[in-house]
Image: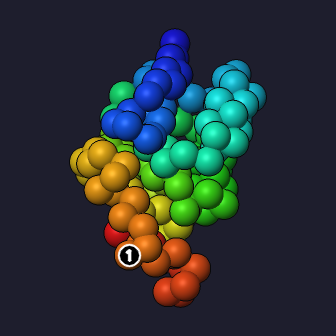
Amino acid sequence: MYRIEVREWDEEGVLVELRGEFDLHNLEELRETMSNTVALRRPTMIDLSGVTFIDVEATRELTIRSRLYAHHLTLCNPSWQVEASVAACGLGEWFAFRSEMDGPSRRWGFPDRIPFWAIGGRPVF
């Protein structure tokens, strides 16, 4: 079982909450949700605290999206299952999880935020 919930967050952002198990069976829905959300070009926080299982393909998808859209997409509150999958896939260096969910106005403090590619691939928040 799984649930993907998308809603307004703060005054200018979008919150995507992932709950349950993510694998090949719901990968296309995860991709579609992420594509539709990033197309809004609004600050987006993906809350991973409710993920109870995530396979290699879903972990890979989060990795790709977090790198491609790092300027307005943030992964936060990873469950231990997410952290374990990221570590097992050897992708720990590619992720910069946030532990709290500040409002977008504080989180994306333009122009102070430096793009991750400007500093050797490590996000600065």
Judge whether residue 104 can be spotted in this image: yes
The residue type indicated by label 1 comes to Asp
Q: Position of residue 116 (x, y in %)?
A: 52, 75
Task: Tell me: 20 left or right of 42.
Answer: left
Task: Tell me: 96 left or right of 72.
Answer: left
Residue placed at 49% from the left, 48% from the top? 43
Locate the C terminus and report the quarter of the image it occupies.
Answer: bottom left
Above-or-below relation of 59 to 33: below
Relative depth, front residue between 69 and 103: 103
In the picture as drawn, the residue positioned furthest to the top comes out as 1
Relative depth, front residue between 82 and 107: 107
Residue placed at 62% from the left, 47% from the top? 41
SS at circle 1: loop
Residue placed at 37% from the left, 49% from the top? 104
Q: Position of residue 53 (x, y in %)?
A: 47, 31
Q: Position of residue 19 (x, y in %)?
A: 43, 23
Q: Position of residue 25 (x, y in %)?
A: 70, 22
- Find residue 52 and report its image quarter: top left
Judge whether residue 48 can be spotted in this image: no
Residue placed at 37% from the left, 37% from the top? 11
> How crowded is the residue under tag 1: few (<14 C-alpha within 10 Å), some, or many (20+)?
few
